[in-house]
Image (cartoon, rainbow, N blue to C red):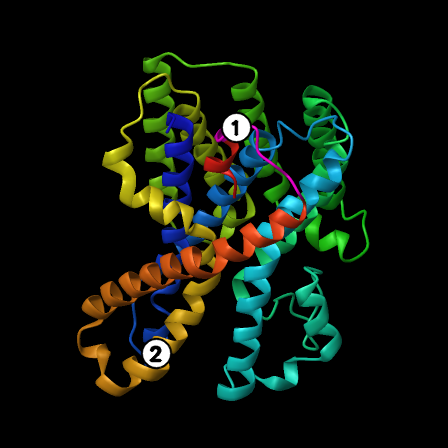
Amino acid sequence: MSNSFVSIHVLRAVAAMLVLFAHLWTPFSMMGVRFPNFTEGAAGVDLFFVISGFVMVYSSEKFFGQPGGSARFLGHRLSRIVPLYWVTSTIRLIQILKAHVFSISDLSWPFIVLCYLFYPAARPSGAFSPLLGVGWTLNFEMFFYVIFTVAVLFKRRMAVLFAIVTLSALSIGGSLELFPQPLAYLTSYPFLWEFIYGILIAFAYRESLRLTPLISVTLTVAGAIFYVWTCTLHASGEIAEYREIFWGVPAACVITGLTLSQIPAQTKLWMPLVVIGEASYALYLTHTITLDMLYFHIARKIHVANYPWIYAVFEFTVAILIAIGVHFYIEKPMTRFLRSKFRYQRKSGEVAHVEG
């Protein structure tokens, strides 16, 4: 397994675990236990977006400028993203209706249907939050896929140029409040810039650009230090408003340093994180469901407020184990079945390792 494969999976694992870490403390707030603000795990979302931009270009090499390439690209992406999201959204809907996780009055059937369609619809209360809370990021992902589906009509260099120009124009237009809803929502956040970072890194990789060990290590270490430092700050104010700088840029530096590195990968050393990275999508979608189930069936009954850190480690471990199980026994079989319907046969094992 090449250095790029290993590094992307490891970074996916880091991103997913950061988001998980940010949500570990919710049960304690329900029980009135106070903790320092750990919402900085939200920075994992920014790392995910940069990785997504990278993967789109990297894994689309066989689609660029090919007859039917756009349709196969979109089918490939939908078969990866849609099934597990629909399953977890349905589980969340059942939880809401059964356990009153939040007010049912803030639901409507049109809203529920639009959630399944990845359309950023507002609740009756006006809040833009889907059934499955973490699903808001997938609205941006799907928006990105639509743009990239058009880009794939062209050869790689023109496709990259089209994607960058389109995403830049949309982001600038969004900052100037030029668009109606839902485009206003999708362009009002800085995530489109983070997609662009990933696109540029993957383009450099595909153009055979490689870094010297010194530059690679410097970029990786400097990016990681700055990323960790900003993750210790409160996720509000300038950090949240300019997250494409405070979180996106250091994330891009780390990804650049690792994926363009000429230093041999130590696959066995990183294998546990590689496995979690492979299951990162399942972890991202299932962890809040897992945490809620643990809270209702365990936390409330055994007074975990007396030993919160032990319970937090327990939550963390169970969420990861369940996600790995979901990935191997639910997500992969569904994806494999659906992709077989598109009759897309890989000519190389390379793409399979980094698709996500």
* Residue 255 in view here: yes
Task: Quadrant for residue 25, please give it.
Answer: bottom left
Residue nearest the observer in this picture, 348 or 242: 348
- In x, y percent, where is residue 192? 63, 41
Task: Quadrant for residue 63, please give it.
Answer: top right
Q: Amino acid at mark 1?
A: Ser
Residue nearest the observer in this picture, 84 or 234: 84
Task: Kindly state the secondary structure of the residue where label 2 is placed.
Answer: helix
Residue nearest the observer in this picture, 303 or 81: 81
- In x, y percent, where is residue 247? 46, 40
Going by the image, does 210 lie left or right of 266?
right
Specify start and end residues of the magenta stretch as a single range.
343-350
Considering every residue shown, the one lying at the far top of the view is 212
* First of labels 1, 2 by sequence position: 2
- In x, y percent, where is residue 289? 44, 71
Q: Give the CA separation, mark 1 to mark 2.
A: 45 Å
Dominant secondary structure (helix, strand or loop) of the stretch shown in magenta: loop
Residue under label 2, please give it: 295
Task: Kindly state the secondary structure of the residue where label 1 is placed.
Answer: loop
Q: Amino acid at mark 2?
A: Tyr
